[in-house]
Image (cartoon, rainbow, N blue to C red):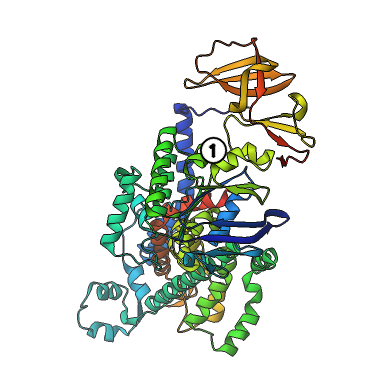
Amino acid sequence: MAEVVLESVSKRFGNDLALEDVSLTVPDGSFVVLLGPTGAGKTTTLRMVSGLDVPDSGTVAIGGRPMAGFAPAQRDVAMVFQQYSLYPHLSVRDNLAFPLKSPVLRTPKDEIARKVAEVAEMLQISHKLDNRATALSGGEMQRVSIGRALVRDPAVFLMDEPLSSLDAKLRSDLRIELKGIQANTGATMLYVTHDQIEAMTMATHVGVLDRGRLVQFGPPREVYEEPVSIYAAGRLGQPRINVLPAGLFGGAPDRAVYIGLRPEHIAQGDGTEAIVRRVERLGDQTRLHLNLRDHDVVTVTDAHTDLTSGDTVKIRPRNPLYFGADGARIV
Amino acid sequence: MSFSVTEPARRTKIIAGILVAGYAIITLLPLVWIIATGFKSPSDAIAYPPKVFFEPSLEGYVNLFTTRTRVTDEAFAALPPPETWYDQIVRDSRMVIAGPSRYGERFLNSVIIGFGSTFLTMVLGTMAAYAFSRFRVPLKDDLMFFILSTRMMPPIAVAIPIFLMFRQLGLNDTHLGMILLYTAVNLSLSVWLLKGFIDEIPVEYEEAALIDGYTRFQAFWKVVLPQAATGIASTAIFCLIFAWNEYAFAVLLTSGTAQTAPPFIPTIICVGGKDWPAVAAGATIFLVPVMVFTILLRKHLLRGITFGAVRK
């Protein structure tokens, strides 16, 4: 287990700037989730830590040791790849045992058997151990690839959207399982995802990347409640935050150009009139799609609401966020 | 235009079967001819019209592996009775066995040089192809083109310079010299073929192995090679076939110690008349190793040819 520190890391691929001056500290034993759309630099950040790519400038340190010149094998990191990357010529068992058999670890045979069995049990793939890695479903492959990381006890786990191709049930099971493993072992985890539930439930810290820059880093609640920009605010929250012209409700600060309203930050009953466009009943909650002076607004309401499309409701902001013309937060 | 996959009509199947059978007969006929001739007696072998049915004889094979002399009638009559079946066959033509022929050695030379150069080509070719496929090599395209360009001239065009160089280096008529030569000729094709195969293997597997605690070379050995087995097998067959069949350089550069079978087989003709059955027997035996090698690797060969050819 170790702390991971990136300092002013920049990386270019040809003319594309993948990372620009990223400084990030992953505290020992923390679970850091990187958020951002495709191309924001999430995977590149993982590859910098793993040593698969080397920064053009800046430094990476794991457990206080600068990693410049260290091959991936010497860094004691485990990585789960988005494309699974299972060894197609090996069985599931051999895939799981592969890191343990490496010249770095040289694990004794009985120890390998014990660990492989343990991890297979946890990931519910015990019955598939003798299958070829290519004779698995997508979800099974992804579990094997997670297992290949979990058999080890590395300084840091790097996970690139490890749950993205699992079905909902398994995904929520594994989410809890992974969080449990991380909490119990005190493992340091750097985790990339698109899924905001994963970010909110598993992370001790969330890092928001925007076109190669780390724009915000902090506990998930903080990033959710105090986003530094419209972009950061849009990374968390489902349905997404509503961004409207600041003048729509009045009471905005001088420099504010936009007002950001999370769906739950809209009070009903008084204020500005809006027309109900669509009612989505999700069971535990109901989403209202409103039209407010030609702007689309999504909010949540009581699960058993009587509203139907065409009705009129009055809404007003509650704890709004204000942003300037450049999208930066105005406090 | 749309295509649909349906069971072809019975008539279509029959016509297709006849066409395929006809093609097979045409391609296999020379092979059958060679094998049959090997078992004919010398007079049957040159009979006209050709004999399809004949009394099989092992004379060709015996002649292939022996040298024989003609002796005077008195000496022939004074010989003790033949000790073995092959003595008997030779006596039937009123000759006696003088000793073994050199076919065995020549055949062994072919095996050593053919498989040796194929092995060396595969070792060097796979590593070069891997480097070209995975690393940023300066002037990569130019180097790849240079490698290909070594095959643009017919190899025999450089025969004289190679002959002179080999003489200087003492490589004339040596196994090592022939192995190096065939390796040099085969390398360009094999680097190109193998690079295609290795390009098809996603780089993520090696990256996973690097993270799993393996060095670059171990990742290459444990992850890339097993997946490239198909391509390596089919490339190896191409290389072996070239080295095995090569005639021109073999004639020029080998005469004694390292002579391979191809230049030796025609020399059989001159020993005691036109001995076609012995030539055919030599050719038949010469076919066997490549046939066995190809059959052993045939599963890979078919998959390999299609697999490597398709680009994403």
Disc 1: which chain? A
Height in image: A212 above or below B173? above
| Residue B244 in view | no
**Residue B30, position in %: x, y?**
46, 56
Q: Quadrant of the N terminus of chain A?
A: bottom left
Residue at coordinates 63% horizontally, 77% vertically from top-left? B159
For this view, does A179 lie left or right of residue B171? Answer: left
Comparing B14 with A223, the one in front is A223
For this view, does A247 lie left or right of residue A278? Answer: right
For this view, does A53 lie left or right of residue A120? Answer: right
User: In the figure, residue B158 lies in which quadrant?
Assistant: bottom right
Tag 1: residue type? Gln
Height in image: B236 above or below A310? below
Height in image: B151 above or below B256? above
| Residue A70 in view | yes
Comparing A48 with A305, the one in front is A305
**Residue A169, position in %: x, y?**
41, 33
Comparing A259 with A126, the one in front is A259
- Label 1 sits on a secondary structure element that is helix
Tell how many labels.
1
User: In the figure, residue B282 lies in which quadrant?
Assistant: bottom left
**Residue A260, position in %: x, y?**
68, 32
**Residue B303, position in %: x, y?**
47, 50
Local packing at callout 1 (Cα closer than 10 Å; few below 14, some 14-19, many 20+) is some
Q: Quadrant of the C terminus of chain A?
A: top right
Mark 1 sits on what residue? Answer: A196
User: In the figure, residue A238 lies in which quadrant?
Assistant: top right
